[in-house]
Amino acid sequence: MDTHTLIDALVADLIPVRRLFPPTLRLLGWLAVSIPAVATVVALQGVRSDLAMRFAEPTFLAEQAATVATALVAGWAALAGCIPGTARWKLWAPVAPLCAWMVSLGHQCWSDWVRVGTAGMMLRPDWMCLPDIAIAGAIPALAIVIAIRRGAGLTSAPVLWGSLAAAALANAGLRLFHAEDAALMVIVWQFGSVALFTAVLTLLRRFLAPIRELYGLP
Amino acid sequence: MDNQRDSRWVALMKAVQAGDQVSYATLLREISPFLRRLARQGWPKGAAADIEDVVQETLLTLHTIRHTFDPGRPFVPWLLALLQRRIVDGVRKHARTHRREIGMDISDVTFSIEQANTAYELPADSKVLRSAISQLPPGQRQAIELVKLQEMSLKQASATTGLTVAALKVATHRGLKALRLMLAIAK
């Protein structure tokens, strides 16, 4: 097809469109859906009895802060990544809170080792972490996938960060009702579940938010 | 100069999002040569047709995702992200196609030996064949005449007869089957 003919066809097909809101506003919209969803799961499961005590501990607060920061920055990066031409640093921004989260978990693990030695490194099965994170993260993940699909859909990075955002938010909720504080257990079962949830959604990205491929010109 | 041009395109794009067709035509006509030039720079080994494909795919992408443009931001980086993506797709598509296809020159002499084994085949009795065709039902006869004797494509035959391609395929298939049967009986 001749380019001039294509231009004429595109012009004839033009209709007004509703502009995409800025990523920050869209993030607020996502949080407005996701926070109540996670809060409902926490309420249904019942808040852990030692929560007030745990909130008095700086390590727990630092870990929770890093988890929530990961959810917020990853969610924002996912939505910013939907806009073509977004600065590259924005797409890498979630790495910083993610590292802070991992460092806080590593620090707790080291403290356990120093405090109680090998007894703090006991690993036992805790399979409930994965379904809990999947249930708590389902609505946030669905909401962010819908938001990502409204975007340009030229790269797969938004699905990766969107999945991480949903999983991190779910994990922040999980820490409020799941009474498991041994650092190694948290790393393996809770952070591992976050990683698995993120990996599975990212692998399904072609179905969740298909990349706009070539149109196949006639 | 570049800033002025970008501001102009931002204003046009803002009007495009509101549904202004005149601004859209102006914008697309102005950015096409710009895209073509950059596509050539981004894919120096691309043939002219490949470059034009990239330009057209970029215009189509712009059309589909025009709602993602924020008039508060510059237009060119937004547009270049689309172009870059389409160049990558174009190069991949080209590489994929070339892995499977072999380019061949059209030459007058295709084979150095005598063609096929026609010399050993018994010449078909055209009279018997013509008589067999005339005995076919009208639909099948017409399909055989157009597709097999006049060597029209199914699409051309469909345009001539007004029948669908599927109907023509069926009629041709049934016609050939009937002919095979009639010629076998005639032998």
Image (spheres, grey):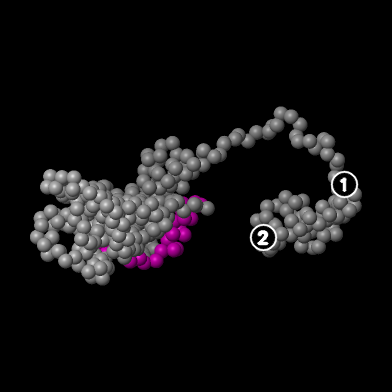
Q: Can residue B162 be seen in this view?
A: yes
Q: What element carries label 1?
A: loop
In this view, A65 is above or below A95:
below
Residue B38 vs residue B148: left or right?
left
The image quarter in which residue A43 lies: bottom left
Q: Which of B71 and A65 is in front in this view?
A: A65
Amino acid bearing label 1: Asp
Q: Which of B26 and A64 is in front in this view?
A: A64
Q: Is A20 within the magenta?
A: yes
Bin the neighbour count of mark 2 within 10 Å (Cα to Cα): few under 14, some 14-19, many 20 and up.
Answer: few
The residue under label 2 is B166
Residue in the picture at 70% in, 31% down: B111
Q: Which of A199 and B28 is in front in this view?
A: A199
The residue under label 1 is B125
Q: Is A124 within the magenta?
A: no
Chain letter for mark 1? B
Residue in the picture at 66% in, 59% down: B165
Residue in the picture at 76% in, 58% down: B174
Q: Where is residue A151 in the image (x, y as percent from the top left)?
A: 34, 59
The boundaries of the magenta stretch are: A1-30
Measured Cα–Cα span from mark 1 to mark 2: 30 Å
Q: Where is residue A211 in the image (x, y as percent from the top left)?
A: 40, 53
The numbered mark, 1 or 2, whose residue comes first in the sequence reads 1
Chain letter for mark 2? B
The image quarter in which residue B163 lies: bottom right
Q: Nearer the viewer, residue B143 or A58?
A: A58
Q: Position of residue A160 (x, y in %)?
A: 32, 52
